[in-house]
Amino acid sequence: MSAEGQQRASGNGFARDTWINLKRWVLKTTRNPFVMTASLLNPIIFLVLFTEVFGQITGGAISQSLGTDASYVTYLVPAIVVQTSLIAATTSGIGLVEDIESGMFEKVLVSPMHRGAVFLGKSLSEVLRIVVQTTIILVLGYVLLYVDSGASFHEYVATGWLGLAGIVAVGIVFSVWFTAFSNVMALFTRDQESTILAVNLLQFPLLFLSSAFLPLDILPGWVQTVAALNPITYGVDAARALMFGQDVMTVIEVTGFGGMWNTLVPALAVLAVLDLVLGAVAVRFLNRASSSSVQ
């Protein structure tokens, strides 16, 4: 029987298949807390070290770029939120390779499950992890700012609690495209080392060739050109716009929405297109893997 015929014969709906996969991956994560802790450690180190090393020397450039006084902690936290989402998305592909190597993936493929539900359930488990981890980063950022300057919560997030929730949502929207990419790499290489190499080879250059750590207008022209094509720039700028409650985007000039929406609308549009395109590619790879397995 073909994979499509198996899906029709399953009796499970798409939502049920999604829930089964979500539950399986959440249980897998909770049974190995080291993965969650280790993936959070790197962003925390970046947050603490970068604020200590660059905090005193970048204040003028940041204030000039934003047109207002700003702490480097507040400027950096949105970038660390995006980095956290990026790392969580990276581990998604690695987890899939572990399934492939253990033989679990082949069992899922020959089961009568919707292939889109397999990807969606796995992605939702990463979303839950991102919500927890980005919340920890946001709390830690405020602690660092309060210790440094005694700033109030409103000085930390100009848009308040709603903006804080919005920053978490940006991290989720941003993570989808890289989650899809890391899963495609896992299905393509079927090897853990190759998958780690592929995603890390892309991850760190993208981070530093973006608006994550410094204002683009003080960086070389070629970096600004790359940043305009870099998805991380749009994720960081969207989160930063919510952090400061103002338009912070410099790679695209948009004036039709007003204030921070001039950043949020184009940034989220770019990320949504990436999510749809790469999500479709990931599902296609799952379908191809399923067809090969059935044959």
Image: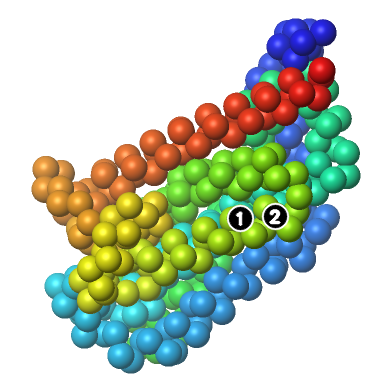
**Colour mapping:** rainbow
Query: Label 1: which residue?
Result: 198
Q: Residue furthest left?
A: 255
Q: Residues within 10 Å of mark 1 (few under 14, many from 20)?
A: some
Residue found 75% across the figure and 39% down from its top: 23
Query: Looking at the rendering, in which quadrant would you find the C terminus?
Result: top right
Q: CA distance from mark 2 to mark 1?
A: 6 Å
Which is nearer the eye, 68 or 250? 250
Residue 268 position by quadrant? top left
Residue 40's mark?
none
Look at the numbered disc 1 and give the secondary structure of its residue: helix
Q: Amino acid at mark 1?
A: Ala
Identify whether 149 is placed above or below 141: below
The correct choice, above or below, for 139 with respect to 228 in the image is below
Q: Which mark is residue 194?
A: 2
Task: Name which quarter of the figure residue 274 lies in.
Answer: top left
Q: Nearer the viewer, residue 9 or 207?
A: 207
